[in-house]
Amino acid sequence: MPPTPDFDATLRDHLLGILRRATPTTLQINVGKLCNQACHHCHVDAGPGRKEQMTRPVAQRCLEVLAASPAIATVDLTGGAPELNANFRYLVEGARAMGRHVMVRCNLTVLFVPAMQWLPEFYREAQAELVCSLPCYGPENVEQQRGKGVFEQSIEALRWLNRLGYGRLPLRLNLVYNPVGAFLPPAQAQLEDRYRLELGVFGVEFNRLFTITNMPIKRFARQLRQWGKDDEYMSLLVNHFNPGAVAGLMCRNLVSVGYEGTLYDCDFNQMLELPIAAGGKPLTIWDVNDLSALEDAAIATGPHCFGCTAGAGSSCGGALT
């Protein structure tokens, strides 16, 4: 078994020092693990049977902290399928009432869950930016990763959103590509051109394509072990370390809050239970008011961080370089 790669040592080797937080500008709220899908690459291990869900007191505290944190410009709602949480509308409306930009990570098929048909109009009324999973422009790869019939439903959902004005400014509709296997995403700009060409056949418009590296965490990590490719994939990430991606890492400007209120540097650290800590004690949403107080704190790192710094780099907003 090869030695566990040391991300901090790699930073030192490139004279990059300790990875530290800048002023937080994004509050990412993970409302829980409930989802109407169970995708093979999911680092959250989300699915229809998961019970972990954010409660109203935690959601209310998130909005209280948001109000006390003027530097936070964007609220990024994720899950699971964030729309399935009972506090989804409350969080969106609360953030928008404060003038904050709201981003929703949508799997598209949630629009067809019974009693959820109100979502597209609600997105539009809230002027929410949508970041929608579509791991390929053709049905075979999408259904390999996300299940039978998902591609057809996804195209239908995209057309629905396009009819409401999404895909044309100011209503931003971005798509997300995740590799189907144990390899890095291709160049984002070229793949975006291919998506436009292929999805144009279906009459679909979108603003941007984000390419995101699959993280060796939870469900995808188990899949790698089943394939016997876990060491190979980690070596791929380590060998493609890009020091130019470090400055743009999302953990530097983002605070992630878990469904139960614990604070993390990113959603990946959240799934690995690596919380932001002070004095050896994990911090929660009740321990802070203005999130700017977290500026300059050291970021918790691990071997998974090579996933965000491999190749062109990877973040919730796509490639970094």
Image (tube, rainbow, N blue to C red):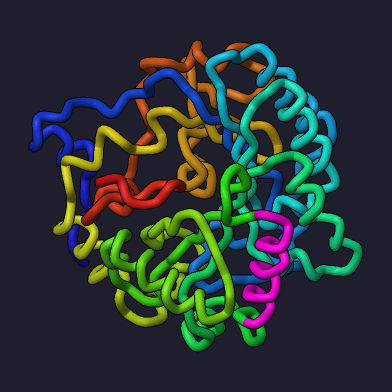
The part of the image, by quadrant, that contains residue 166 is bottom right
Which one is in front, 281 or 164? 164
The picture places residue 277, in percent across and down from the top left corner, at 49, 24
Residue at image position (70%, 49%) is 32
The picture places residue 315, in percent across and down from the top left corner, at 39, 47
Q: Is residue 86 in the magenta section?
A: no
The picture places residue 15, in percent across and down from the top left corner, at 9, 29
**Most prominent secondary structure in the magenta stretch?**
helix
Quadrant location of the N terminus?
Answer: bottom left
Is residue 62 positioned above or below 64 on the image? below
Q: Image check: 185 left or right of 95?
A: left
Which one is in front, 240 or 70? 70
Which one is in front, 178 or 6? 178
The picture places residue 29, in percent across and down from the top left corner, at 63, 38
Is residue 179 positioned above or below 252 on the image? below
Is residue 161 positioned above or below 321 on the image? below
Q: Image check: 315 left or right of 68?
A: left
Is residue 259 positioned above or below 156 on the image? above
Q: Image check: 86 left or right of 26?
A: right
Residue at image position (22%, 36%) is 8
Residue at image position (64%, 63%) is 107
Q: What count of labels does the image hold?
A: 0
Q: Is residue 161 in the magenta section?
A: yes
Residue at image position (59%, 62%) is 45
Which one is in front, 142 or 258? 142
Q: Which residues are magenta?
A: 152-165
